[in-house]
Amino acid sequence: MIVVTGATGNIGRPLTQALAEAGRQVTAVSRHTAAVPAGVRHVVADLTEPAGLKPALAGAEALFLLLSGDLHAAGASPADIIGEAVDSGVRRVVLLSTLGVATRPFGSTRIAMRELEDTLRESGLEWTILRPGGFASNALWWAESVRAQQVVAAPFGDVGVPIIDPADIAEVAAACLLDDRHIGGVYELTGPEVITPRRQAEAIAAALGSLVRFHELTREEAKAAMTRSMPAELADDTLDILGSPSPAELRVSPDVQRVLGRAPRTFADWAARNVAAFR
């Protein structure tokens, strides 16, 4: 049995579906009650209280660990989740980390994630670490303004990074959970090209078949919006990358191709599949 945390999100939902379609028993964990695919067990648990995971982990052989935003905040103890996995007899953990661990290792949220990676490596479990860059699904922040005003509002309009489709992360995670060849792997996951917010707006407009204008926010305006759903430190770290990506953050990684045997999906692909959110 495989446990998927964050099972109702942009990565967890397609991962849960893929594992179920592969014929595996799956337990989907989320903070709130939610619909899951047929045959999938659902457990409501809050990862900020790791002991509450015991019912989900009972009998599990593998765990996909995706931290909720509050587990990136100061004082959080995500390492306790690894301890619960060990105590429950879990054999393998696939951890969703972040590319920033390698590209900006001294930010506070990056230090904490590096410590979690190290805890996993030292746990005695089989492990794989996934380090994605920015997500294509972050464009859903713009859905309301596109629906209401045909506007994408974002900072750093002409600065791009190679954002990745969460469906690709889910496919890589499924491969790592199911295939022993990926034990001990550390995979940097990006999309196939650098794309700016302005070009993302153009891709959304093309998917809609209608005009979408681009409005550039200041960094302060963007941070105010982001801190409604994430810690301020994480928002600052994210904005640092978006505003001034390093050469390592501009690099298109070969790891999606290496794991899946195909190129990663483009942002235009993501926009076409998710166009209903913008209508």
Image: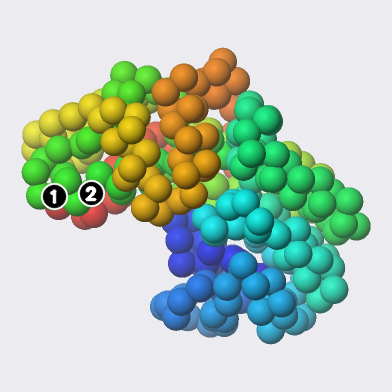
Q: Is residue 174 above or below residue 8?
A: above
Which residue is the site of mark 2? 143
Spot occupied by residue 279 in the image (x, y as percentages of width and height) = 14, 52
Is label 2 in a helix, a strand or a loop?
A: helix
Q: Amino acid at mark 2?
A: Ala
Taking the image as shown, residue 197 lies to the left or right of residue 152, namely right
Say which of 225 and 162 sits in front.
225
CB within 8 Å, label 1 to label 2? yes
Residue at (15% x, 38% y) in the render: 151
Q: Is residue 111 visible?
A: yes
**Where does residue 23 sit, x and y in percent of width and height?**
62, 72
Residue displayed at 44% across by 56% down = 10
The quarter of the picture where residue 108 lies is top right
Answer left or right for 216 relative to 103: left
Q: Give the residue at x 52% y 67%.
A: 7
Name the amino acid type tagged 1: Arg
Identify the residue under disc 1.
147
